[in-house]
Image (cartoon, helix red, strand yellow):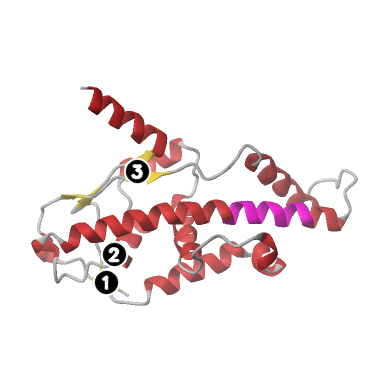
């Protein structure tokens, strides 16, 4: 449960580590997702089936759902890595100790209060709903050390994984009370891994 934002933070702004997202798909990924979207529309009767029977359409839909889940998992790994780096900053910053700033504080910052610049960059990358993507990524990675194979999931879970992931994130956020934090006191930047590497190379070159 989130506590009220702590007045002890005042108007100071702490610069958090950059959030770096790595590539999490392969060349076949977009095609699988597109096939799954079409299959879902065909199963719902909104598109003609194009010769595929219901079992084949369901197979394509399940394959695309697994591809989505797998991508969310790797996003979640990057998010957890960032949260851990933020907690290290809290642990070595005297002013932030004892304020109940926990893992859930930074998860909530990402999902509900990401800085405007971060939200804008995600939209430019084509992420229409960053809040849902981050929440589901964190929910999935909260329960899996490694991404399972498709056969380890039930069809029901794959078809509705987004609902399960939403609840897993909500459950994780309720494990401890935590201080709510906002961009008023905590700022960070978002980079793709390749973009960040190029930036570092330029800095080293100088």
At 25% from the left and 56% from the top, the residue drawn is: 86
Separation of marks 1 and 3 at Cα, in angstroms: 23 Å
Mark 1, other Cα within 10 Å: few <14 / some 14–19 / many ≥20: many
Residue 167 appears in view: yes
Residue 179, percent from left and from top: 23, 69
At 44% from the left and 74% from the top, the residue drawn is: 171
Magenta stretch bounds: 59-69
Is residue 30 or residue 117 the one in the foreground? 30
Pointer 1: what residue? 178
Residue 76, percent from left and from top: 45, 56
Specify the label residue 105 is tagged with.
2
Mark 3, other Cα within 10 Å: few <14 / some 14–19 / many ≥20: some
Residue 54, percent from left and from top: 86, 57
Residue 198, compared with residue 157, is above or below; it is above
- Residues at discs 2 and 1 in contact (Cβ within 8 Å): yes
Separation of marks 2 and 1 at Cα, in angstroms: 6 Å
């Amino acid at each position: 449960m989130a506590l009220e934002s702590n007045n002890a933070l005042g108007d100071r702004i702490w610069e958090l580590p950059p959030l770096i997202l790595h590539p999490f798909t392969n060349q076949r990924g977009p095609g699988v997702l597109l096939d799954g979207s079409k299959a879902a529309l065909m199963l719902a009767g909104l598109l003609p089936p194009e010769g595929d029977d219901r079992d084949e359409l369901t197979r394509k839909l399940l394959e695309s759902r697994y591809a989505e889940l797998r991508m969310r998992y790797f996003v979640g790994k990057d998010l957890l890595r960032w949260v851990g780096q933020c907690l290290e900053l809290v642990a070595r910053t005297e002013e932030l100790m004892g304020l109940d700033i926990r893992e859930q504080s930074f998860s909530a910052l990402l999902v509900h209060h990401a800085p405007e610049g971060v939200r804008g960059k995600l939209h430019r990358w084509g992420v229409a709903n960053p809040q849902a993507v981050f929440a589901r990524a964190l929910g999935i990675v909260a329960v899996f050390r490694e991404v399972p194979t498709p056969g380890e999931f039930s069809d029901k879970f794959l078809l509705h994984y987004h609902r399960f992931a939403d609840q897993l994130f909500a459950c994780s956020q309720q494990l401890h009370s935590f201080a709510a934090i906002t961009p008023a006191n905590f700022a960070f930047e978002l980079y793709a891994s390749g973009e960040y590497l190029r930036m570092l190379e330029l800095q080293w070159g100088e």
